[in-house]
């Protein structure tokens, strides 16, 4: 990981780098000390949201899917919207940690660990939904090819089955990649702790001593996993998009979906990294490590992917017109009709994903923390709305006009959505307090090495 | 302990604990041991696990219908069609509601006295005592019930000394009064629709259950079919509300309510003039006035003249108004319609309709007066709810002055809530009986099982009463034996013995004689005794005053039109959840009561869909939700009957309460004494509140997606449904190439044309088209014959254990209907109001089913017979299949639904009841397919099941009163689906999205479509007119379409 020139002295966004290895250790290990009130409040709120979501799920488990707002022909709604949303969030983490690593993009150093954690927790959150939205979630194990006497098997033609493998692979690889990167940093924590905590960190750091051989193996395996994870960024969300594109439903049945979904995933993920890291940097006073330089680069990623999305939105309309497919034309025309049932959702999406990010073309706004935070939040809402538009409005305006109807989520569904955010935040907060949310190893690479007599 | 000992101990301990964990206890816990014991003595006529069928009759009076009751292990579970009587073969929605009424949890099934359970002995003693006391005090013993016919009528009349009233608030009394005045005592006339080229209706809902002539639906479908003759009958309706029946009209003229009599008389006069009529009716026609009729009704004089011209020209039939014509001129409307048929000379109206007793409102009012005066000692109440039907609470008040009110029915309603003595009698599934639905047709009724509770036959109850009142004349036999004796009189007379003396007379009827018993068995199996049809034609022997004016009670700005609810009718089925939850054919509403308002009128009132309005009539006011609807005349507020039933009528009546429009009507009758509901002017105002109406319907038009397809009636008349080279050429849509391709991909045609056709039509597809070597089960849906009556939906619900979800779950559109009827409005070239299309939509059993490939656990798959099978217990509930289904016919169990006892006893054991979280759908009644195949196999039959056994196999096809649905094997060249798939009217729903559905649709014939034919010269139109079947001509689209 030794980069040629850690920090370009002429880079205008150049961070205030820490002076020494010791300072780096201290700054990051500081989070292990007594929790701040802000952190504790955040954890409690997340736990409450999580428990509330769990209670809502319990209601659904007991009384059936009828507690949701689903009805024929709109059989998917908030749950699948939120599933795709969280899967999408995860993608930015892998992009930053794996792809930016492979292309040796230096600004990833400060943000990659937190992004990677975000990936793992977002996929964990997303994984709740395919189970949770089942009519009989206690039979979810039927998705797996387990041996059984009745010779029951799954349907490999089904995109949902592809999802099972794509997402489980993604989760496994992300988790392993995440953990491998953590090992040297956990060793630092081990070395700075005592008692039981030290033993736990000791086990988790799998005997890391920082020897030359260890570093050699570490660097090799890290590179391998980065190369392994990089294509998953493209494949997983492509597979998720096939859940829709493979069904004949107008508004879903489109070959543009895989790239469109991947771009959307990175867009929402980068915005989410801003939304997560900025409060964390303020909370832990890590401006030395995560600062405007990173935010601005993330904002630039968002600008690029926002452009791709805007193009994709436009292309859907162009293809609808060019194909002369009446069903296709009808759904897109209806979606964009301001007075139609989901007109508001469409224009909210366009505003959030296409118009609001334009602000970041201005350097001033792109480097202003308040505007960064607000626009990132808007993008998060917009990307949720995008999935809502795709899923709900297409089903609401299906082939048979006699079945056209509308869908409104119930408080149970909102409860589960809030609960999923609580679940995600809970894990993320716990992580940020117990593990180095900033990669100590890689930060040290940017610090001038300690030279005897210096 | 060393390592070896440890491992030994571990192995032993593990084995023991594992073994003990799966002892028999586990099995006992999870699967209770059930011992299967054979019957020592098998119940008669019952094989456990199979259905028994009994030909019987459901419904009373003119509504009686020959059916087969289906029994399983001693309980009635379904109603099937009876095709042995020669009367229309079908099952109507009302028949199935009677089935649900049988199992209703609210039904009283044991006698009660003063609110406490009683024995039949007690109850009978009480009844007899009160009746004898009443008689000796000079008071009346009276009976009020629905229309009844056959043997029971004489018994009722004798027991009550003529004080038996048969009344229903559905407007048939005016027709009976008019018939009596004009033709004498011949009963109602019979209408022959089959050969009519024009059907003119003044509102009678004859395509639904509210009008009492079931066979008219099949006759109408025949008249509308070009296959019957080379014409399509034109249906003209003059009525303010385009209800389910009038929705089928080619021309609908929305008149002012109550003016139909003037229009009918004017048309009769014009027809008489055109036909140079000079018979006995001439004087009565003198009152006709075309201009007055036109100005009062809002129908132009030109329209009236053109209707009359068409009516006079070719064979035509006019139908009266039923409940929709029950205005102050109700009897005059019926009289005018009779005369119209009479003067036209078409002979489409014949004697031989229903001739049982029909009491008029005047008769009921006389009884009410007697009741109020305290002259009625005992009132026997049968299944008719007069408290609900008569305005002003008059009946309820009068009931208080009756000595003893007795309920003879177990079905609670607001009227018999006042009964002190409950003597619940058998219902149609438990009783012996007969009904003369039309003159000369005596339908027999027999019980198929023991009664559900402690009920008795009404005949036996009445016989007991008769014996107490007048022992001398009372019959000694039981009710059943009495009936058998009555029927046996129609048994063929035995031939005289060879040595018979000259004055030999046949022996008296003896039902114990073997010969008679044999005849009776045959009769019961057939379900009918033919007593001699009436022939000849109706002659006008009397006269009546037919002059009428538009007479309106009340002084509001809007006309109130009252029409019968399609399923609840006048409210009699309000406690049947199937009746409440089957969507209204025109609006899709379930439960509740709604008001239909024309869009312009709604604009005037400032209301939108689902706004609440207050309707103020002279008799009171009600609040109902608004449905803005194009199929109602302007300034008319149309409200269906049957709402507003209270908890006294049962839990479901209460759940779907709505408002009772009959309660706000002024108390009036027409000059002849007939029941009146129309012709009231009301004040209407928005209350500002929102109503809570629930409709299952989505978009009103089909957005050019070819769900509702029309052909030109004239074009179709020329070619009929013969197989043609150019499938669907009558439809004028661009699907033909695809349809041809589909045809070629079906096994039947592939076998016929192994190479040539395939080559031309082969195409590349990701997955191969499945082969169906033996069967390809297919349903043909003739949208031209479908009139939207909804019998198929109810039949499906009964057959396939579809739960009723209840009103609040319907608000979330959780209906579980495997077959639904999509109702579309379409504006054709010269339509004034939208044409209505009913398109029954069920699983299309696609060969390339989008649902199958997306199911992750293979819970739905394609069978070799072409069905999309559904394995309920494999389903995990991703609902992906429902999202992928282009027809949105898959239904999801959002909850576990329960059938309150004893509704659960109606469940069909051949169909599993689904639980929470499982997807379900139509599989063409696969249980019936299996049963039929097994039956043929058991007979040693090795070929495919023949067409006759399949044609009406599915519950929907069996029920359809119009025979719009035919089932069969597409691979069988003799089957209806095979033939219709290659007809000029055939189309497939969404045929260009490569799903290859199995269901054939046949387009609806319209007189209002005038397609520009290709080539700019109309050569094709001219040419095809002269071509015979099977000759080649290019389909219309080929030149211009692509």
Image: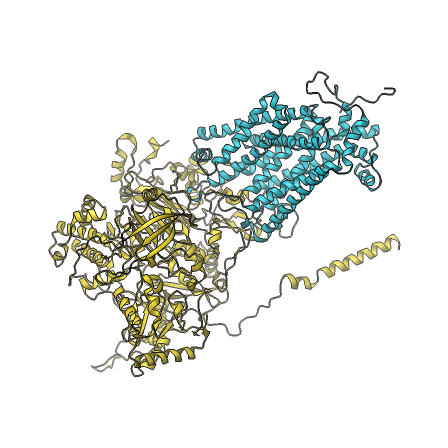
**Which residue is drawn at the image coordinates 53% and 28% (left, top)?**
A312
Q: Is residue B474 above or below residue B985?
A: below
Q: Is residue A229 above or below residue B832?
A: above
**Residue that extends furthest to the right in the rendered view of this protein:** B2
The quadrant holding residue A184 is: top right
Q: Which chain is cyan?
A: A
Q: Which chain is yellow?
A: B
Task: Tell me, yes or no, if residue B360 can be seen here.
Answer: no
Q: Nearer the viewer, residue A26 or B87?
A: A26
Q: Nearer the viewer, residue A112 or B116?
A: B116
Q: Nearer the viewer, residue B401 or A323?
A: B401
The quadrant holding residue A102 is: top right
Give residue B616's position: percent from left, percent from top: 33, 53
Give residue B266's position: percent from left, percent from top: 17, 51
- Quadrant position of the C terminus of chain B in the picture: top left
- Quadrant position of the N terminus of chain B in the picture: bottom right
Q: Is residue B710 above or below residue A11?
A: below
Q: Is residue B872 above or below residue B142?
A: above
The total number of labels drawn is 0
**Residue that extends furthest to the bottom in the rendered view of this protein:** B472
Q: Nearer the viewer, residue B902 or B331?
A: B331
Give residue B799's position: percent from left, percent from top: 45, 58
Q: Is residue A14 left or right of residue B392?
A: right
């Amino acid at each position: 990981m030794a980069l040629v020139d850690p920090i370009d002295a002429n880079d205008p966004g150049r961070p205030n780098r820490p002076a020494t290895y010791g300072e780096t250790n201290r700054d990051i290990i500081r989070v292990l000390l007594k929790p701040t009130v802000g952190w504790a409040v955040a954890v409690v709120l997340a736990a409450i949201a999580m428990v509330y979501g769990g209670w809502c799920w319990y209601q659904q488990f007991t009384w059936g899917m009828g507690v949701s707002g689903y009805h024929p022909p709109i059989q998917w709604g908030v749950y699948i919207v939120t599933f795709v949303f969280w899967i999408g969030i995860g993608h930015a983490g892998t992009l930053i940690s794996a792809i930016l690593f492979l292309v040796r993009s230096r600004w990833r150093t400060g943000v990659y660990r937190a992004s990677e954690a975000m990936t793992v927790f977002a996929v964990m959150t997303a994984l709740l939904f395919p189970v949770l939205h089942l009519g009989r979630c206690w039979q979810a194990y039927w998705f797996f090819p387990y041996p059984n006497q009745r010779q029951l098997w799954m349907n490999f033609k089904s995109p949902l089955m592809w999802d099972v493998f794509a997402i489980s692979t993604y989760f496994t690889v992300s988790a392993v990649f995440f953990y491998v990167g953590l090992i040297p940093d956990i060793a630092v924590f081990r070395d700075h702790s005592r008692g039981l905590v030290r033993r736990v960190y000791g086990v988790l750091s799998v005997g890391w001593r920082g020897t030359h051989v260890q570093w050699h193996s570490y660097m090799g395996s890290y590179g391998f996993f980065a190369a392994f994870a990089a294509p998953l960024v493209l494949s997983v969300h492509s597979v998720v998009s096939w859940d829709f594109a493979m069904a004949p439903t107008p508004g879903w049945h489109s070959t543009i979906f895989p790239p469109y979904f991947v771009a959307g995933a990175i867009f929402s993920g980068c915005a989410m990294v801003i939304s997560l890291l900025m409060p964390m940097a303020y909370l832990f006073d890590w401006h030395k490590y995560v600062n405007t330089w990173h935010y601005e680069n993330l904002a630039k990623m968002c600008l690029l992917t926002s452009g791709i999305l805007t193009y994709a939105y436009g292309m859907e309309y162009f293809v609808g017109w060019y194909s002369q497919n009446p069903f296709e034309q009808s759904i897109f025309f209806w979606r964009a009709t301001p007075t139609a049932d989901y007109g508001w959702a469409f224009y909210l999406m366009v505003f959030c994903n296409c118009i609001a990010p334009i602000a970041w073309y201005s350097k001033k706004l792109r480097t202003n923390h308040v505007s960064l935070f607000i626009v990132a939040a808007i993008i998060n809402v917009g990307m949720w709305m995008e999935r809502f538009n795709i899923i709900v409005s297409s089903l609401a305006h299906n082939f048979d006009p006699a079945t056209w109807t509308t869908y409104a989520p119930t408080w149970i569904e909102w409860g589960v959505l809030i609960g999923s955010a609580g679940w995600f935040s809970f894990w993320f907060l716990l992580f940020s307090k117990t593990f180095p949310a900033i990669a100590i190893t890689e930060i040290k690479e940017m610090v001038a090495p300690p030279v005897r007599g210096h | 302990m060393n390592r070896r000992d440890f491992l030994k101990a571990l192995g032993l301990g593990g084995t023991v604990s594992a073994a003990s964990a799966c002892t028999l206890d586990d099995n006992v816990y999870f699967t209770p041991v059930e011992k299967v014991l054979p019957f020592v003595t098998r119940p008669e006529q019952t094989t456990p696990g199979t259905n028994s069928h009994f030909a019987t009759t459901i419904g009373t009076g003119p509504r009686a219908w020959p059916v087969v009751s289906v029994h399983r292990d001693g309980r009635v579970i379904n109603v099937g069609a009876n095709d042995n009587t020669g009367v229309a073969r079908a099952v109507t929605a009302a028949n199935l509601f009677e089935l649900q009424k049988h199992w209703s949890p609210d039904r009283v099934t044991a006698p009660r006295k003063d609110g406490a359970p009683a024995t039949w002995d007690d109850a009978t003693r009480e009844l007899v005592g009160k009746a004898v006391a009443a008689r000796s005090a000079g008071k009346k013993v009276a009976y009020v019930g629905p229309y009844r016919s056959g043997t029971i009528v004489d018994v009722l009349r004798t027991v009550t000394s003529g004080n038996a009233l048969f009344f229903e608030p559905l407007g048939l009394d005016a027709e009976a009064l008019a018939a009596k005045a004009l033709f004498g005592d011949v009963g109602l006339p019979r209408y022959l629709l089959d050969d009519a080229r024009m059907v003119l209706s003044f509102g009678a809902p004859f395509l639904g259950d509210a009008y009492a002539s079931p066979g008219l639906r099949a006759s109408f479908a025949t008249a509308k079919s070009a296959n019957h003759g080379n014409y399509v009958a034109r249906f003209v309706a003059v009525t303010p509300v385009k209800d389910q029946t009038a929705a089928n009209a080619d021309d609908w003229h929305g008149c002012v309510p109550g003016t139909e009599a003037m229009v009918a008389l004017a048309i009769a006069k014009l027809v008489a003039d055109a036909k140079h009529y000079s018979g006995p009716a001439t004087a009565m026609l003198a009152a006709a006035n075309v201009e007055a009729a036109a100005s009062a009704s809002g129908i132009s004089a030109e329209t009236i003249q053109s209707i009359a011209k068409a009516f006079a020209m070719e064979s035509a039939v006019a139908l009266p108004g039923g409940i929709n014509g029950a205005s102050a001129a109700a009897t005059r409307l019926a009289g005018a319609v009779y005369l119209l048929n009479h003067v036209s000379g078409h002979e489409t109206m014949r004697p031989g309709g229903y001739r049982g007793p029909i009491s008029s409102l005047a008769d009921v009012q006389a009884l009410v007066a007697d009741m109020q005066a305290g002259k009625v000692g005992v009132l026997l109440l049968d299944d008719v709810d007069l408290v609900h039907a008569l305005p002003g609470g008059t009946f309820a008040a009068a009931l208080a002055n009756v000595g003893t009110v007795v309920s003879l029915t177990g079905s609670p309603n607001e009227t018999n809530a006042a009964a002190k003595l409950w003597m619940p009698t058998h219902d149609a599934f438990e009783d012996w009986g007969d009904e003369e639905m039309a003159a000369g047709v005596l339908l027999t009724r027999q019980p198929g099982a023991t009664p559900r509770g402690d009920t008795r036959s009404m005949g036996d109850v009445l016989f007991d009463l008769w014996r107490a009142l007048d022992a001398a004349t009372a019959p000694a036999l039981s009710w059943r034996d009495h009936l058998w004796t009555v029927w046996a009189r129609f048994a063929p007379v035995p031939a005289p013995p060879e040595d018979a003396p000259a004055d030999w007379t046949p022996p008296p009827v003896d039902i114990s004689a073997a010969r008679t018993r044999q005849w009776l068995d045959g009769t019961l199996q057939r379900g009918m005794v033919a007593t001699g049809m009436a022939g000849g034609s109706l002659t006008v022997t009397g006269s009546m005053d037919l002059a009428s004016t538009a007479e309106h009670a009340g002084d509001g700005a809007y006309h109130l039109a009252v029409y019968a609810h399609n399923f609840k009718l006048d409210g009699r089925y309000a406690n049947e959840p199937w009746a409440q939850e089957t969507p209204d054919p025109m609006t899709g509403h379930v439960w509740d009561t709604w008001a239909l308002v024309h869009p312009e009128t709604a604009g005037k009132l400032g209301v939108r869909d689902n706004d609440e309005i207050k309707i103020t009539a002279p008799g009171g006011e009600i609040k109902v939700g608004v449905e803005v609807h194009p199929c109602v005349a302007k300034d008319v507020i149309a409200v269906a009957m049957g709402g507003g039933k209270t908890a006294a009528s049962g839990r479901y009546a209460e759940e779907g309460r709505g408002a009772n429009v009959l309660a706000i009507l002024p108390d009036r009758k027409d000059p002849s004494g007939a029941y009146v509901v129309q012709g009231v002017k009301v004040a209407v105002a928005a209350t500002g509140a929102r109503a809570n109406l629930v409709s299952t319907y989505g978009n009103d038009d089909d957005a050019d997606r070819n769900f509702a397809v029309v052909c030109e009636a004239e074009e179709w008349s020329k070619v009929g449904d013969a197989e043609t080279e150019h499938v669907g050429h009558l439809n004028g849509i661009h699907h033909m190439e695809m349809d041809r391709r589909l045809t070629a991909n079906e096994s039947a045609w592939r076998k016929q044309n192994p190479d040539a056709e395939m080559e031309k039509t082969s195409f590349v597809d990701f997955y191969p088209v499945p082969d169906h070597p033996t069967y390809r089960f297919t349903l043909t849906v003739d949208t031209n014959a479908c009139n939207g009556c909804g019998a198929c939906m109810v039949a499906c619900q009964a057959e396939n254990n579809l739960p009723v979800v209840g009103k609040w779950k319907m608000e979330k559109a959780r209906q579980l209907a495997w077959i639904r009827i999509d109702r579309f409005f379409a504006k054709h070239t010269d339509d004034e109001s939208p044409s209505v299309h009913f398109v029954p939509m069920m699983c299309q059993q696609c060969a390339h089913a989008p649902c199958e490939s997306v199911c992750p656990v293979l819970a739905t798959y394609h069978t070799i017979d072409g069905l999309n099978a559904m394995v309920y217990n494999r389903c995990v509930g991703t609902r992906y299949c429902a999202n992928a289904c282009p027809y949105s016919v898959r239904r999801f169990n959002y909850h576990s639904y329960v059938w309150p006892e004893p509704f659960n006893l109606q469940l069909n054991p051949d169909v599993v009841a689904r639980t929470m979280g499982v997807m379900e759908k139509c599989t063409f009644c696969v249980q019936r397919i299996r049963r039929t195949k097994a039956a043929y196999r058991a007979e040693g039959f090795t070929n495919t099941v023949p067409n006759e056994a399949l044609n009406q196999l599915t519950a929907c096809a069996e029920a359809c009163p119009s025979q719009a649905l035919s089932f069969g094997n597409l691979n069988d060249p003799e089957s209806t689906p095979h033939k219709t798939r290659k007809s000029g009217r055939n189309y497939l729903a969404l045929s260009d999205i490569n799903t290859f559905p199995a269901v054939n649709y046949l387009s609806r014939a319209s007189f209002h479509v005038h397609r520009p034919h290709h080539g700019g010269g109309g050569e094709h139109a001219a040419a095809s007119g002269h071509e015979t079947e099977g000759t080649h001509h290019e389909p219309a689209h080929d030149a211009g379409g692509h």
